[in-house]
Amino acid sequence: MLTLRINNLSRMVALPALALLSACTATTTAPSTKIVVNVRVPANDDNPLGTVDSRFIALIADFPGTDGKLFDIQRYQPGVQVKVPTVPFGPARQIRVDVYKGEDQPTVPFARGTSVPVDIYSTSAGVELHPYVTRINNFAAVFGEPGADGASPQTVLASPQVGTGIAALPNGKVLMVGGGVPKASAKSPFDPASYASFTSTIGVYDPDSRSLVTAEDPANQLATPRAFHTIAVGQTVAAIVGGVEMDEQGKPRASNKIEFYNVTTGEVTSPTQTEPNLHFGRIAPTVIQMFEHQDYFLILGGKGNEDCPANPHDGLCGGNTWEIWHATGGFKAMGQLSTARWHHAGVRVPGPDGGFVMLVGGENTQGAVKTMEVVQFTVANGSVLVSDSLTNCPADCPAKPAGFLWNPVSYTDQPVRIWPAALFVANAAMQYYHVYMIGGFSDVDHKAAAKSVDVFDIVQSQIIASKQMASGRAAPIVAAVAAGPSAGQVLIAGGSSTDTNHWNSGEFLHVDSDGNGGLAINIDKIENLMGDGDRTLGAATGLSTGHVLILGGTGGTATSLTGRTDALLWNPY
């Protein structure tokens, strides 16, 4: 049995219940389990089921590896009966609600919401699904459950968190770690001295209830409060690496600490080996999981506390080295990059028996870095190999795999990008595999920001297009849509045009067919603004519901900073 209710749980005001007609026939035997689809909407004027009554509603069953199958679409008004899909047995079943408007049968929805994936089998207990329906190509507020008195719920973050780390967990929830609390009198959010304190808070955001649960047990919090660290999720743990911490005198410094969050228990541990710390402090390093189903992590670059030669031949530092760490085995190896860099972007690209890391832009002691560096990692004959600027394998090296990049490869004559963003997005159906290099400051003094988005095709190993955003954005908030019919779209929101000017607008990148067998890459504006004001140095990640979650960051004026506590969702086009 499948029933549908449409409620506004954020205001505790129920819309009229919808009676149901018989469900359509499914491809497999329908479960006898009672399934309740409880549609939720924002508790404000953004409610897409609000005042206009000439609307259509579609209920779609989404299965893994598909774009869903349309079961029924018809005019919707409160109290009108609607058909709903019969959900067949299987893993990761979802219900998507598309809402249309207009007098005629429409083709493009103006609002959408999708439940989180659930496994439905004959032995399943009753299941309640909660699609959160918001307007397409709009930012919407994230509300937790109402309080006992029915009052409006609290904002997700109890205090401002700038430079927080977030990452999607295997169970579909989102890990949020640490962050900085800005001084009200501070001017530049990019100066570590602009922060009064750093937090040890660890929270987990649940996209089903749209609430954040923070750990109260000290064993489930950071041992080292920090911000501007990097998180990478492995098989059993998430590595929390580097960042900015306070020294004994209360001054900010680059952290050389690494901690591991157990994705099952929530416990946080530090390495127990004789070398428990990174070899160098690293602010905002690049960190990636090296191999699937493993807990090996590759850590590259990042600003340290020591003088850092641009060339590793002149001395080693955080900015010109990489390290390999394992969750239980500790430190494994260290090597050199071709060029020191920090305030850069890094992205993992899959490859044979491992993959590649692309390091984009940044700066060092000699100024802006105008190269893109590619480091390869792989397993050959039981040995882990990583490109190293000071290492060459002789011709008779027994572990030498064909075509391996013993030295990192540098792409020269790249545009200046300091505090840029980078994402790898693959779409097998449309056959594109792109790295997007997005924005960044155009100079070391942060007086201007780039509008360009360069598109690097990893199959062709070259930049195939350069697109222009409406606004120059350094430290933009970016994430790829992870699921649903809009998967592969890229959110580009907020960011800074200078040290003291920030944005509350957003844009999105999407790839479509050009009608001639090729691809058209476009950037369009998001229809509304982030409601709580301008925001830079925030974080975002795609959710299993098709929304993109935005957390943390700061904004303000030329004379003060204001940390952002509101969490937002962007619903892709």
Image (tube, grey):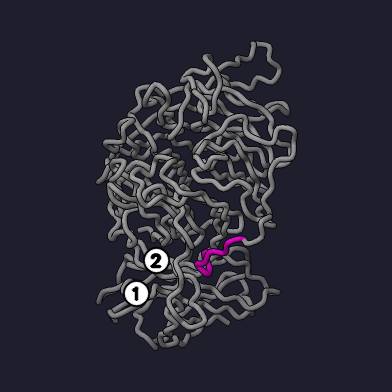
Residue in the image at 33% along x and 29% along y: 415
Residue 410 is labelled as none
Disc 1, disc 2: CB below 8 Å? yes
Q: Earlier in the sequence, mark 1 or mark 2?
A: 1
Residue at the far top: name it.
395
Secondary structure at badge 1 equals loop
Q: Dot 2: within a 10 Å radius of its alpha carbon, few (fewer than 14), some, or many (20 or more) residues?
A: many
Does the image show residue 123?
A: yes
Residue 44 is labelled as 1
- Left or right? Give the position of 132 relative to 235: left
Q: Looking at the rendering, in which quadrant would you find the C terminus?
A: bottom left
Q: How many marks?
A: 2
Residue in the image at 43% along x and 76% along y: 152
- Along the line of sight, the residue nearer the viewer: 545 or 302: 302
Q: Which residue is mark 2?
A: 141
Asked if 516 appears above or below 262 in the picture, the reply is: above
- Along the line of sight, the residue nearer the viewer: 157 or 101: 157
- Along the line of sight, the residue nearer the viewer: 459 or 195: 195
Residue 554 picture location, percent across and down: 38, 52
The boundaries of the magenta stretch are 207-215
Asked if 60 appears above or below 438 in the picture, the reply is: below
Distance, label 1 to label 2, CA atoms, is 9 Å
